[in-house]
Image (spheres, rainbow, N blue to C red):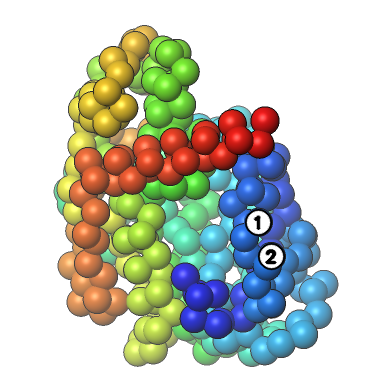
Amino acid sequence: MLLDKENYILSIDNYDDFYDIAIKKSNQKNHFENPNFRFIQTDIRKINDIKLDKEIDCIIHLAAKAGVRPSIEDAHEYFDTNINGTLAMLEFAKKNKIQQFIFASSSSVYGINQNIPWSENETDMLPISPYASSKLAAEKIGFTYSYLYNIRFIALRFFTVYGPKQRPDLAIQKFFNKILNNQPIEMYGSGNTFRDYTYIDDIIQGIIGAINYNRTMYEVINLGNNTTINLEELIYQIGKVTQLSPKIIQAEYQVGDVPKTYANIEKGKKILNYNPKIEIHEGLMKQYEWIKKIKDVTKDNS
């Protein structure tokens, strides 16, 4: 979308093997045809080794070690990448006088919190996974650099993003793949955990709003859909979209998962003109159409 408007984009990725690197490369391939797109394969912790060939006016920091459950098994790497990586990015912004810094935070920072729906002025933040803690710590580092170095830092707390090109380990994409391959779905707990699922186009709208934001120097903003669906109903809806019957295996509740996420999005509406439009059934249909399309491409190339 940004490239369509002839913006110059410098993209950085270390091609972490958390999931199949071929998927990541496939997601990027069309960009390489655009002369305004430059790609560098490197770790964000080494970003200060990069020499810029053009002036950059905004950083959109989406890089992280992702996933709540894996972070419990490898907390050190999550803290190193997500905290020290963000620190390196902020140092890069300071060195190159980049004054707009957008940071992808997470709804997981709220932890187990009964003040539903969650708002950004929440003060009692007790995250329950290393991933969540690393994201909250990065927000605080952002405030420090904003205060010291006049960098506008906007932390966007994403609420369970889904849609085309979704990571294969995340619930919706994983459930689609399981159903379409006639494999059972593990349903953790009773199926009564709730999530505020947010379609990717709505998230992009929020990011673009943050790119254009130029008032205060530090903000934390929820990007959610302001509605929830429980796990059992989500699986049912995916079955309805695919017109297939899900096979469900009951599994134990996963440590580190919160029972409910639910975004108050009034602040985003007010200062970013954020207005999510895609409800869950429509979003699932769009994701399914994309899945069918890429499967057809795979068949054609086989």
Q: How many marks?
A: 2
Residue 211 at x, y percent in the picture? 44, 79
Q: Which one is nearer the viewer's eye here, 195 or 201? A: 201
Residue 161 at x, y percent in the picture? 38, 49
**Can you say whether 221 is above or below 224 in the image?**
below
Q: Please tell me in which quadrant of the rendered image residue 86 appears.
A: bottom right
Name the secondary structure under disc 1: helix
Q: Residues within 10 Å of mark 2 (few under 14, many from 20)?
A: few
Residue 79 visible from this viewpoint? no
> Which residue is disc 1 drawn over?
29
- Kind of residue indicated by mark 2: Phe
Name the secondary structure under disc 2: helix
> Which residue is disc 2 drawn over?
32
Identity of the residue drawn at 71% across and 87% down: 54
In this image, 239 relative to 173: left or right?
left
Q: Is there CB contact under 8 Å for labels 1 and 2?
A: yes
Identity of the residue drawn at 31% across and 51% down: 198
- Kind of residue indicated by mark 1: Lys
Q: Quadrant of the C terminus?
A: top right
Q: Which mark is residue 51?
A: none
Identity of the residue drawn at 33% across and 36% down: 258
Residue 65 at x, y percent in the picture? 60, 47
Residue 249 visible from this viewpoint? yes
Identity of the residue drawn at 29% across and 46% down: 283
In this image, 187 relative to 264: left or right?
right
